């Protein structure tokens, strides 16, 4: 909490993110700064594997706040995202009340109380009593448009209506980070309520810094070869373009197997950790290591 | 000089923002023209709005708050902050870069020279000839008397439904458009209805069951059910707008607009020698606006066809995002390919692995004696789930059954 209040300038965030092995540029940090200062949700878009989700984890660490995560998928509905009644418990509750002489209204009031409510991520996020949590709504583009529309109330007013109980308003507004891979365009209404940042693949220098941060033991020669090769992969037409996480996996695989430089044998044995499609692997193997570094 | 109308609009606009110290009739185009920081930022918001960015009052307010929180001190952090607030897509971010420089970095001295060739504000839709007519191949209105007489009565409606689109006169074309709009609307409605299930089926809704049976001591006597949600599909449409498809492309485009009401997600592309994504334009409510926007984007309207190349552009650029196994793909094309052989086949194979099914609608198929002899079409055939005609209204309406039984 105290970090939040003493924060004066985006640059202060960079240092911290750096400590937590997250390399961010000025634009990204400014967007995060505004997320904290204006308390508006931040929408991050970009290709898979560039660290969109990771930033939420690091932010939660920095704020020392709980991270609440909601993974979106096709068909995600309010029951899975917001709340559900504990039906089994309700049925038991009704049984136990038999012969207690309570009126129907009283019974109803009882079994639709907090005790029988199952809180799903979104409700959890706005019912925190101690401090503002970080709410990560991951891969929002996978959900239905209906769900996106539902989010509008939550993102602007930070409140949720439950018919049996009433409206629950957040005492501590969560810091919301939404991510999207752009498989579909999100609605303008939703975008209007958010800050926006586009996260792209890093350039050679930045990616080397990132891998170095994550794998401090890596040798400079190998690091350079690996990252150059990955940068090359991204320029080509591959079935699946590798992200940063795959670069790190690959470098780690090479280190674990004890390779100190990228040669043909090393390439063939570890290619599965960077390329995830038969066609890609076959093509790169045929061209050989010389074409890469 | 701004017209009276325009200046009135602007006045309303600036008072709408609620900042009292700017009550000017002309929008400030550059930072140096303003008196205070607050005014500059508000003017900047108006400036980017006039260039198509979605900057409303909320965004302006956020920008002011951001400036207040100490970001003004550095040029870069201010720029990044405004970027996060005003932009909502990678494309907008590119435009923003230019606008930012234009607004904040223009020197009054440079302006003097620039005044002669004044910059035009984008975003105005110019009045053009009726886009639908242009697309159908009739540039200007020259309807003859005879044509007007030749179409009338209920029988004509039935006849028009079966007439090959390429053989329509201009009068008929206009009328057909009216019929098509009506029929397509009905079709979308029918398809929606069909997916709704009766309340007697579907899974049991425990929530409603418990609630309803409380007065029976909580015993679940009366079962309440949850109606099955209509399972909407995702649809990707690729429309050929090359010269050979001229007579058909407009009506087909209108057809695509109808489909948008029914499908959960509709992605539309037009192609001839290049592929252009038009999904966003289709979201406009008025179809004429949508068509005008699309024809603006599609530079290669009515040129040659490179189907294979365009399909490759599709799988390469959008395939990873859009093809995740569930969508249905509709290709509307006559299959007259002038690209490299084998390409159509290869791309369709790749698409097929990652979608639910591929439907190819070919206007030529409706012609008597047509056989898929064109190389592009021949290559495609083995990889299609449905190959059907699309030469008249009736054949398009039949697609309803194909789609509904998915």
Image (tube, coloured by chain):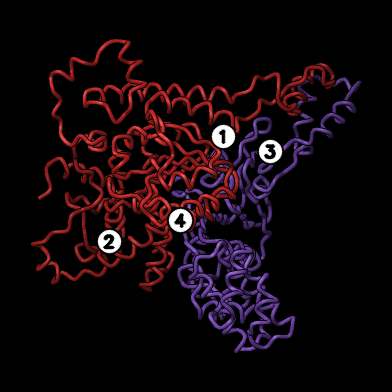
2 or 4: mark nearer the eye: 4
Above or below, A257 against B43 in this view is below
Label 3 neighbour load within 10 Å: few <14, some 14-19, many 20+: few
Name the residue carrying label 4: B312
- Under tag 2, what secondary structure? helix
User: Do circles 3 and 1 both sit on a common chain?
Assistant: no
Q: CA distance from mark 1 to mark 4?
A: 27 Å
Q: CA distance from mark 2 to mark 4?
A: 47 Å
- Under tag 4, what secondary structure? helix
Give the chain coloured red. Answer: B
Instruction: Return the residue nearer the eye: A158 or A205.
Output: A205
Name the residue carrying label 3: A79
2 or 3: mark nearer the eye: 3
Q: CA distance from mark 3 to mark 4?
A: 41 Å
Give the chain coloured purple. Answer: A
N-terminal-most mark, 2 or 1: 2
Q: CA distance from mark 2 to mark 3?
A: 47 Å
Q: Residue A149: give x, y in percent of width and height.
A: 53, 40
Say left or right for B223 vs A48: right
- Under tag 1, what secondary structure? loop
Quarter of the picture holding the N terminus of chain A: bottom right
Name the residue carrying label 2: B40
Residue for point 74% across, 81% down: A256
- Under tag 3, what secondary structure? helix
N-terminal-most mark, 1 or 4: 1
Name the residue carrying label 1: B232
Instruction: Return the residue nearer the eye: B352 or B201.
Output: B352
User: Do circles 2 and 1 both sit on a common chain?
Assistant: yes
Q: CA distance from mark 2 to mark 1?
A: 47 Å
Chain of the residue where label 4 is placed in the rendered structure = B
Residue A209 visible at all: yes
User: Do circles 3 and 4 both sit on a common chain?
Assistant: no
């Amino acid at each position: 909490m105290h970090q939040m209040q003493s924060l004066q300038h985006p640059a202060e965030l960079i240092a911290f993110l750096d400590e937590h092995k997250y390399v961010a540029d000025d634009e990204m940090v400014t967007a995060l700064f505004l997320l904290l200062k204006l308390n508006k949700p931040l929408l991050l878009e970009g290709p898979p594997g560039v660290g969109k989700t990771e930033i939420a984890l690091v932010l939660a660490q920095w704020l020392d706040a709980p991270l609440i995560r909601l993974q979106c998928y096709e068909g995600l509905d309010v029951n899975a995202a917001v709340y559900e009644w504990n039906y089994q418990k309700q049925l038991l509750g009704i049984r136990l009340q038999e012969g207690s002489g309570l009126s129907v209204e009283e019974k109803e009031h009882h079994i639709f109380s907090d005790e029988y409510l199952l809180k799903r991520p979104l409700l959890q996020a706005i019912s925190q009593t101690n401090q503002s949590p970080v709410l990560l709504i991951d891969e929002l583009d996978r959900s239905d448009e209906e769900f996106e529309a539902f989010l509008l109330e939550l993102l602007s007013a930070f409140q949720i209506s439950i018919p049996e109980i009433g409206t629950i308003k957040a005492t501590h507004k969560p810091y919301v980070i939404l991510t999207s891979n752009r498989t579909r365009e999100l609605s303008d209404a939703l975008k209007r309520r958010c800050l926006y940042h586009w996260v792209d693949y890093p350039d050679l220098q930045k990616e080397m810094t990132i891998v170095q941060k994550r794998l401090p033991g890596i040798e400079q020669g190998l690091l350079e070869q690996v990252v150059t090769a990955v940068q090359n992969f991204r320029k080509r037409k591959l079935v699946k373009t590798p992200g940063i996480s795959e670069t790190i996996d690959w470098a780690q695989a090479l280190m674990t197997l004890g390779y100190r430089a990228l040669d043909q044998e090393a390439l063939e044995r570890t290619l599965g950790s960077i390329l995830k499609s038969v066609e890609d692997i076959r093509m790169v193997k045929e061209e050989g290591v010389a074409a890469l570094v | 000089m701004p017209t009276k109308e325009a200046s009135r609009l602007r006045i309303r606009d600036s008072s709408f923002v609620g900042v009292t110290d700017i009550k000017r009739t002309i929008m400030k185009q550059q930072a140096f023209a303003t008196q205070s920081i607050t005014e500059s930022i508000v003017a900047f918001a108006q400036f980017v709005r006039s260039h198509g960015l979605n900057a409303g009052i909320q965004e302006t307010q956020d920008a002011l708050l951001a400036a207040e929180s100490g970001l003004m001190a550095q040029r870069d952090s201010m720029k990044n902050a405004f970027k996060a607030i005003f932009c909502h897509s990678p494309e907008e971010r590119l435009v923003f870069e230019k606008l930012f420089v234009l607004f904040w970095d223009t020197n009054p001295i440079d302006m003097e020279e620039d005044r002669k060739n004044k910059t035009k504000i984008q975003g105005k839709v110019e009045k053009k000839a009726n886009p639908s007519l242009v697309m159908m191949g009739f540039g200007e209105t020259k309807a003859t008397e005879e044509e007007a007489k030749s179409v009338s009565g209920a029988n004509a409606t039935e006849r028009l439904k079966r007439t090959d689109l390429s053989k329509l006169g201009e009068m008929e074309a206009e009328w057909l458009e009216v019929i098509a709009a009506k029929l397509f609307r009905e079709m979308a409605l029918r398809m929606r209805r069909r997916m709704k299930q009766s309340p007697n089926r579907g899974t049991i809704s425990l929530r409603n069951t418990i609630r309803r049976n409380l007065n029976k001591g909580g015993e679940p006597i009366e079962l309440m059910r949850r109606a099955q949600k209509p399972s909407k599909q995702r649809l990707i449409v690729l429309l050929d707008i090359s010269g050979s498809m001229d007579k058909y492309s407009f009506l087909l485009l209108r057809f695509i607009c109808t489909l948008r009401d029914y499908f959960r997600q509709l992605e539309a592309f037009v192609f001839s020698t290049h592929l252009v994504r038009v999904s966003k334009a289709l979201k406009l409510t008025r179809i004429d606006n949508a068509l005008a926007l699309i024809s603006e984007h599609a530079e290669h309207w009515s040129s040659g066809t490179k189907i294979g190349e365009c399909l490759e552009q599709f799988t390469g650029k959008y395939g990873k995002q859009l093809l995740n196994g569930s969508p249905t793909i509709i290709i509307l094309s006559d299959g007259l390919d002038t690209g490299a052989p084998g390409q159509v086949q290869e791309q369709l194979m790749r698409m097929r692995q990652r979608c639910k099914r591929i439907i190819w609608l070919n206007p030529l198929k409706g012609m008597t004696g047509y056989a898929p002899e064109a190389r592009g079409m021949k290559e495609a055939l083995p990889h299609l789930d449905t190959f059907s005609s699309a030469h008249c209204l009736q054949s398009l309406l039949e697609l309803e059954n194909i789609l509904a039984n998915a």
